[in-house]
Image (tube, rainbow, N blue to C red):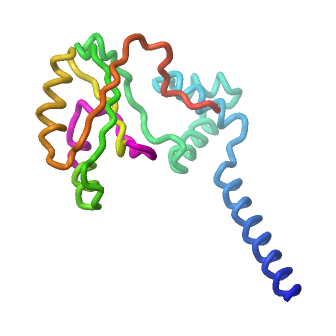
Amino acid sequence: MAKESADRNEFCMYNLSNLIKIKNENMSLNQVDRQILALLQQDASLSTAEIADKVGLSQSPCWRRIAKLEQDGYIKGKVALLDEKQLGFDMLVYAHVRLSNHGRNHLSEFESLIMSYDEVTECYTMAGTMDFMLRIISRGIEGYEQFVRDNLLNLEFVQEVHSNVTMTCVKRTTALPL
């Protein structure tokens, strides 16, 4: 019995060390990679030459590192960040949604519908009393009310929608801490 327990512990430790090794291999960013990612987070329009100059590399190795970071999935895409207010989106609301029926069919249907609404810029499943949290942008409170009435409250399986209207943005960033 003691031998079986020791063998099991050794097996578990071996598997744990292999998992840690695999995780560390996937997280093998060095300081230069982190600098490149930080620069791209600040300004994705920087040329490879500009990035290379800032991190102390020549252009070709820098380009190869960026290509590898993209290939490995560290860089998911490059986008332009638009000013919501300039485009008339002056209302940001976090809406918490509870479904009346938690059957898998309704969860999938709700998630599919949410994916089709441009006003919903983020959607999260939640632990706790609500099922989803949505980040919704609109043109004024009237635009938000119309969106909720026309799209969320018309769904027979939506039981509740609780809205949290934002007032002042204190901090907003897309940059990750590297």
Q: Residue 16: x and y, percent? A: 74, 66
Q: Is residue 99 left or right of residue 54?
A: left
Q: Residue 111: x and y, percent? A: 27, 49
Determine the residue positioned at 45% across, 46% down: 127
State yes or no: residue 121 in magenta.
yes
Q: Is residue 69 left or right of residue 149?
A: right
| Res. 134 image quadrant | top left
State the count of labels: 0
State yes or no: residue 126 in magenta.
yes
Quadrant the C terminus occupies: top right
Q: Is 86 or 147 nearer to us in this picture?
A: 147
Q: Is 4 or 158 nearer to us in this picture?
A: 158
Q: Is residue 135 left or right of residue 68?
A: left
Q: Residue 84: x and y, percent? A: 30, 17
Quadrant the N terminus occupies: bottom right
Q: Residue 74: x and y, percent? A: 54, 43
The outermost residue toward the right is 2
Q: Is residue 129 left or right of residue 33?
A: left
Determine the residue positioned at 29% across, 61% down: 104
Determine the residue positioned at 32% across, 24% down: 93
Say if 89 sits above or below 13 in the image.
Answer: above
Q: Is 13 or 26 nearer to us in this picture?
A: 13
Part of the protein shown in magenta? 112-129
Determine the residue positioned at 23% across, 21% down: 138
